[in-house]
Image (cartoon, rainbow, N blue to C red):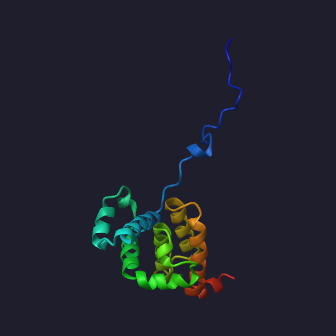
Amino acid sequence: MATTDQTPAAPADKPADKATAKAPPKSARRRSRELALQGLYEWLLNRTDAGVVEAHLRDAQGFNKADKAHFDALLHGAIREEATLTACVQPFLDRPVTELSPVERAALLVGTYELTHCIDIPYRVVINEAVELTKTFGGMDGYKYVNGVLDKVAAQLRATEIAGRR
């Protein structure tokens, strides 16, 4: 006795389910943010020389598809200005910065650096990118914390931009 599958087949142009769907390619800036976050993570844990961290990341898979200038600005700028960037977020933290996870802390450094220096990037994009980084590399709900803190930092650093959107 032969059996037949009664389930209709998925159209040929659509994947059978979301699990098999291919994610859209990452932008060069997204890759540069991911690599900068990874470098800041390493730097926060070990305080390794920034040049050593950068050399390590340049060998990482996908580095050739990153926006190298943006990566350099984020990694070296966040390391160079770590104290200033931390001072920007500190008033909005509910605990000492040293008690944050290294991923949350690195995402806050990347986001605060972009809010401060990358005025061409809308504040909502900066916050969204930091949230996505935290979702990808961080703990379960760390992205919510990063979102809340950067929203307050943006209100302080980009008040004119935010007012213009209302």
**Left of 76 or right of it: where is 137?**
right
- Quarter of image, res 161: bottom right
Residue for point 41% across, 74% down: 74
User: Is residue 9 positioned above or below 23 on the image?
Assistant: above
Q: Pick whichever, 51 or 21, lies toward us.
A: 51
Where is residue 31 drawn, in percent x and y? Answer: 44, 63
Name the spot of residue 93 as percent of width and height, x first. Answer: 56, 79
For the residue pair 28 and 130, the one nearer the viewer reads as 130
- For the point 40% across and 72% down, the residue is 70
Is residue 141 found left or right of 51 in the rendered image?
A: right
Please state which of residues 148 and 132 is positioned toward the viewer in this rendering. 148
Which image quarter holds the N terminus?
A: top right
Can the viewer see residue 68? no
Residue 2 point in image, percent of width and height: 67, 14
Where residue 18 appears, x then y in whole percent? 61, 46
Residue 164 sits above or below residue 29 on the image: below
Please tell me how many numbered marks the rendered image carries. Answer: 0
Q: What residue sits 65% from the left and 86% below the top?
A: 163
Q: Is residue 34 visible?
A: yes
126 shown above or below 90? above
* Residue that protrudes farthest toward the top in the picture: 1
Which corner quadrant holds the C terminus? bottom right
Can you tell which quarter of the image residue 142 is in?
bottom right
26 relative to 52, above or below? above
Q: Would residue 61 be found to the left or right of residue 85 on screen?
A: left
